[in-house]
Image (cartoon, rainbow, N blue to C red):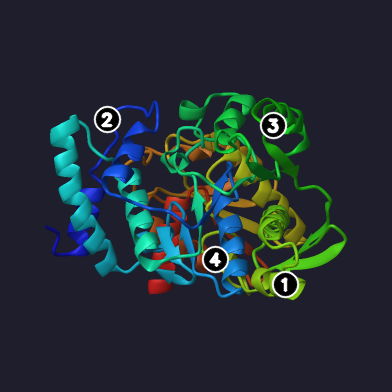
Amino acid sequence: MFNTIDEVYNYLYNQKKTAPRENLDRISRCARLLNIKAPYKKIHVAGTNGKGSTCQYIKNMLSLKNLHVGMFVSPFVISFNERIQINDRYISDSEIMHYMNILYDFNKKYEEEYNDHLPFFELTLLMALMWFSDRNIDIAIIECGLGGLLDSTNFLDYDLALITNIGFDHMQQLGNTLESIANHKLGIAKPNMTCITTVDDSLKDYFKEYAKNNNVNMIFVNDVKNINVSDKTYFEYKNEKYASSLLGEYQAFNASLAIEAIKYFDKDYPKTLIDFALENIKWPGRMEVLNQNPLILLDGAHNIHAINAITNTIANLKGNRRVKTIFSALQDKEYPKMIKKLEEITDYFYFTKIIDLRQIEDIHFEEYTNKEYEINNDFKNCLDTAISKLDKNDILLITGSLHFVSQIREYYFKK
C-alpha cells in the first residue's frame, strides 16, 4: 500500500525488464486479467523524433472540438504526470497512487503465478489505460516508447497509425540500419489499417513495399514547403499557409502530419481551428524559448537525427550572432557525432554532466571538438556561468538529452 507519491516512484523505477521483450503476450494477458477496456478511438504514433509534438498538435486540435482526448507520451520533462493526460489536465498524484495501489497488488499476484512481473513502462501504460477508461474519453493518442513492432503499446487495436520519421537511435534494440529501424516502426501499421508518415524520400520505396505486402493504406505527407523559422515556424502545406509556435523546420512536418491525422477523422475540420491549435501549443524542452534577449533555447535532442534538425534551425536564426552551446549526453548516445554536427553553428561549448544512472562518469566531450570550450561537471554552476557571460546578441543553446534539459529547466525556473 502506497501512502506517498515518492513511495510510488521508488517502486515504479525499480521495476526493470528482466529480458528483452520477444512478444506482447504479457501486456495483453495483464490487460485482460485487469479487465481493461478501450472502446474509444485510438491513434498510435511511432518514429525516431517528433512523436511528442505531433501528439500535442493532434490533442490541441481534437480538444477544440470538445472531445475528451487522452494522451500517453514519454519521457517527461517537468514531471512524471506529463506522461498521462486528458486534454490539458495531467493525471494527479492522488490518481497515480490510486491506480498504482491496484497495480502493485496485481503485480505481486502475477509474479507468484507466472514467475514474471510488469516492468516500469508496462505498469505506466496500464495505469493510463485504466484512467482513460474511468474518465470515459472519446479518443486516445498513444506514443510508442521504443520502436513499434514489439513496443508494449502495440498490443491494442488502433484506428490510425502515424510514423514521424526514421533516424539512428536505440540501435542496440532496433538494429544498425535505417531499414531495420524502419521495420520496427512499421510494426504499428497492421493489415487493413491506414498509416500516415513524414518519412523522407530515401525510405519511401521501403514503406511502399511494406504497405503492398501487408495491405496497409500508406499515405505520405508531401508538399510541405516555404518553411521559415523566426518568431514562429511558418510553412505551407497543400497550398495553405500555417504557423506553429514551436520552432524548428521539422515542426512544419510534424504539424502537417497532425493536420493529415485530423483530416482522416474529420475531412471538414475548420482551418481556423487548425491555425489556433498550431499557434497556441506549448511543449516543454522542444526548442523552448527560456529568454528572448539574449535568446536562450532549450531542446532535448538526444540523437544525431534530432541534432541535425536543431542545427538547421539555429543556422537560420543565427545571422551574425554568436552561438554558445551547453551540451551533455548519456553514455549510450552517439555524442561524438552530435558534437561534430553542433560545431557547424557553435562558437563556444560548455560541457557538463547529467545526473542520471546512464551518466558518463568522466566526460571527455572536448575530444570531439576543435572549438573553444570549458568543462564544468556541475550543470547548475555551468548554466549560471554561461548566462553570466552572455551578451545581448548571443544565442545560448542547451541540448543533448531530454533528461538533461529537464534538470536544467527545473533549476532555471526555480531561480
- Residue at horizontal 76%, vertical 48%? 221
Q: In the rendered structure, are the residues bearing label 3 and label 4 in contact, judged by CB atoms less than 8 Å apart?
A: no
Which class describes the residues within 10 Å of circle 3: few (<14), some (14-19), or many (20+)? many
Q: Nearer the viewer, residue 265 or 233?
A: 265
Q: Residue tagged by mark 4?
A: 389
Quick check: can you spot residue 345? no
Q: Earlier in the sequence, mark 4 or mark 1?
A: 1
Mark 1 vs mark 3: give the one in front: 3
Judged from the image, the secondary structure of the residue bearing numbered disc 4 is: loop
Determine whether 355 is above or below 282 in the image.
Answer: above
Mark 4 vs mark 2: give the one in front: 2
Disc 2 to disc 1, how far (Cα)? 46 Å
Q: Earlier in the sequence, mark 3 or mark 4?
A: 3
Q: Residue tagged by mark 3?
A: 211
- Residue at horizontal 84%, vertical 51%? 223
- Numbered badge on residue 18: 2
Q: Earlier in the sequence, mark 2 or mark 1?
A: 2
Disc 2 to disc 3, how far (Cα)? 34 Å
**Residue 326 screen position, x and y as percent:** 52, 54
Quick check: can you spot residue 62? yes
**Residue 410 screen position, x and y as percent:** 40, 66
Q: Residue tagged by mark 1?
A: 275
Q: Nearer the viewer, residue 354 or 27?
A: 27
Amino acid at pointer 1: Asp
Q: Earlier in the sequence, mark 4 or mark 2?
A: 2
User: Residue 190 appears in which quarter of the rendering?
Assistant: top right
Disc 3 to disc 4, how far (Cα)? 53 Å
Determine whether 167 is above or below 85 in the image.
Answer: above
